[in-house]
Image (cartoon, grey):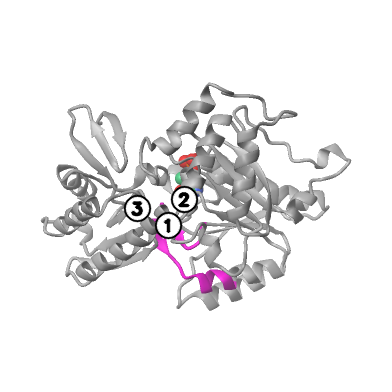
Amino acid sequence: MLGITKARGAVLIDEEGREYIDAIASWYTAMYGHCNPDITGPVANQMSQLDQVIFSGLTHEPAIALSEALMKVLPSNQEKLFFSDNGSTAVEIGIKMALQYFYNKGQKRNVMLAFEDGFHGDTFGAMSVSGLSSYNGPFEDHFIQVERIEVPTENNVDKILSGLKTRLQQENIAGFVYEPLVQGAAAMKMHKPEHLNRILELLKSHSVLTIADEVMTGFGKTGSYFASDQLSIKPDIICLSKALTAGLLPMAITSCSKEIYDAFYDDEIAKGFFHGHTYTANPLACTAALSALNLLQTEAMQNNISRITSRHQQFNETIKNHPKVSETRQIGVIFALDLKIEMSRYGTLRDRLYDHFMENGVFLRPLGKTIYILPPYVISDAQLDKVYKAVSGALDLDL
Ligand SMILES: *Cc1c(COP(=O)(O)O)cnc(C)c1O
């Protein structure tokens, strides 16, 4: 375990003073750079004004300002925001909204639908809709009811749709949880918007609620503010966290359409949505999120996103035909390559790659045979070159 004592911009600094480029932005959070004064400054000011207050019956300016700013950039059908603390909980809330939506309407819909290989977090609902994995084994008996469909490709999309059509006749699926366009933990597996659109369209025509988990994809990483912006079918519910607060403080938001909200708005108290956490809409976290959102909307940050996107494309040209590369893929600032590697060489692959990157001053976390880059938007061209060089260099190792 390596002790990190400092972080600045795109760089992590360890206790010996060694520097590493944070080429995955500390799990896709610190997109505007570590300790960015445009974020830490307002948060420090807020800290001396109002640190924390109950968000029930009381409200505060940072939450109001953040809500107003976020509503302007979210897909236009999103009208209400629900605050919580982390990505798993944002998904948990999305699932609870979908299940209670039908409960309130007196319809028995108690099954959730999800993609195979998805990752939605570590709480029970989020684990349930995630792909089956050995980590979840001990808890499977306690999962909510979930059915899974394959991630669409050119070859299987018609089969998925015809299977779904039959399945939907039972009319008991409440909602579909999906990572739009990129499945992060499944090693940045990507699918096409036109294929996802067809699935969402079919589900909507059967009144299944669509829940976009944009915890990873949100806030510019796919080249648009949200991956859902690239889809013609907009989700009913969106889950946000990670880059929401730029890596400063934990917070999450689940947004929903007016139609969802209205199903909970009733004189009958039991129809309300009862879910509240102690630190809901903490003023410091809201200030961090608002500052981050302001930065994302600057021309400089949008130019950074375009710059990284085209530099990834150039890098891809130099590497995609390498004999040790089986596939490359990219969307926005997310770039991934799969190594062509024999199963027998798999065992210590991750450690050998990780050590190679660290020796070259680059922090990357290979997933299986996939190396992916998801750098902070503020990474410089010289720093990007160093990351690309380390990735190319990995192909020269005896893997
Ligand atoms: C990280 C992640 C989560 C879980 O978020 P936590 O804050 O770690 O609970 C959920 N969904 C996706 C797509 C994620 O990338």
Residue that badge 2 annotates: 296
Which comes before the other along the chain, label 1 or label 2? Answer: 2
Q: CA distance from mark 1 to mark 3?
A: 16 Å
Disc number at residue 374? 3
Question: At 50% from the left edge and 46% from the top edge, which residue is drawn?
Answer: 294
User: Which segment is the magenta one?
Assistant: 179-198
Numbered disc 2: secondary structure:
helix
Check disc 2: other Cα within 10 Å, few if <14, some if 14-19, many if 20+.
Answer: many
- Residue 189 located within the stretch drawn in magenta: yes
Which comes before the other along the chain, label 1 or label 3? Answer: 1
Residue that badge 1 annotates: 302
Task: Mark 1 and mark 3 in contact? Answer it, CB < 8 Å.
Answer: no
- Residue 80, given in percent of the width and then of the height, sits at 69, 48
Question: Which three-letter amino acid code belongs to the residue tagged 3?
Answer: Leu
Task: Mark 1 and mark 2 in contact? Answer it, CB < 8 Å.
Answer: yes
Residue 106 lies left or right of residue 294; in this view the side is right
Most distant residue in the front direction: 299
- Residue 227, given in percent of the width and then of the height, sits at 51, 60
